[in-house]
Every structure is written in structure tokens, then in C-alpha cells.
Image (spheres, grey):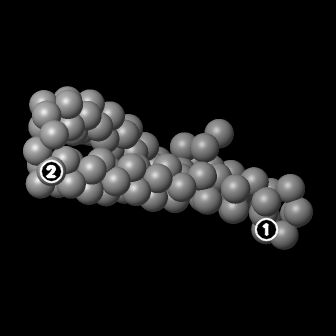
Amino acid sequence: MGGLVGGFIQIFVYLVVLFAVIMIIYVGLMLVLAQGNKDELIKRKDQLLMLVIGLAIVIGARIIVQVVISTLQSTGTVNPTVITNAQNAAKLQ
């Protein structure tokens, strides 16, 4: 079960990053095509900001999970079997 969930999480993260990159390119193109239209520029800048914030949240969550697992493993606070199971579930090996 953990491997299946970890696989879905990994695929989800890759899809979110791919979608964000495509949308950043699209919004950048729309910024260029706005040609000084103030309302359109504000709208596209807001979209770009939200894309970057969303991408940072997804990547940050992934990094936090990896740091927590590494910290628990290095300090020996948790049984090594639990760490191995967590790594397998999150595919962080």
C-alpha cells in the first residue's frame, strides 16, 4: 500500500511541476502579448505569482518530508524499520 501511495505522490509532484512550467511559459507569452494593456498586465502578473507560490508549496512539502526522514534517520530517534518503510512510501531512497 505504501509503495502505491508513494508512487501516486511522486507522479502527482511531477505532473504539478510539468503543469507549472507549461503555465509559466504560457503566462509569460501572454505578458508579452499584453503590449502595455494595464489590466491585462496586472492579471498576468497575479497569475504568475500564484503559479510560483503553488510550485514553491509543492516542492517545499516534498523537501520537508525528505528533511524530516533524514533527520530522524541520522539521530536514531526512530526504529530503522520505520525509516525504511517511510522512505519506501515516499520514494525518497
Q: Residues within 10 Å of mark 2 (few under 14, many from 20)?
A: few
Examine the rendered structure and indicate whether residue 22 appears above or below residue 69: above
Q: Say whether residue 8 is visible.
A: no
Residue at the spot x=29%, y=37% of the render? 24
Say what secondary structure mark 2 lies in: helix
Real-space Cα distance between discs 2 and 1? 55 Å
Q: Is residue 59 left or right of residue 53?
A: right
Q: Say whether residue 19 is visible.
A: yes
Q: Which residue is mark 1?
A: 78
The type of residue carrying mark 1 is Val
Q: Position of residue 15 (x, y in %)?
A: 31, 39
Q: Is residue 54 left or right of residue 86?
A: left
Q: Which residue is mark 2?
A: 38
Residue at the spot x=20%, y=31% of the render? 32
The quadrant of the image that shows the C terminus is top right
Nearer the observer, 91 or 60: 60
In this view, the mark in front (2 or 1): 2
Residue at the spot x=86%, y=56% of the render? 74
Nearer the observer, 56 or 93: 56
Q: Position of residue 81 (x, y in %)?
A: 73, 58
Q: Position of residue 28 (x, y in %)?
A: 25, 34
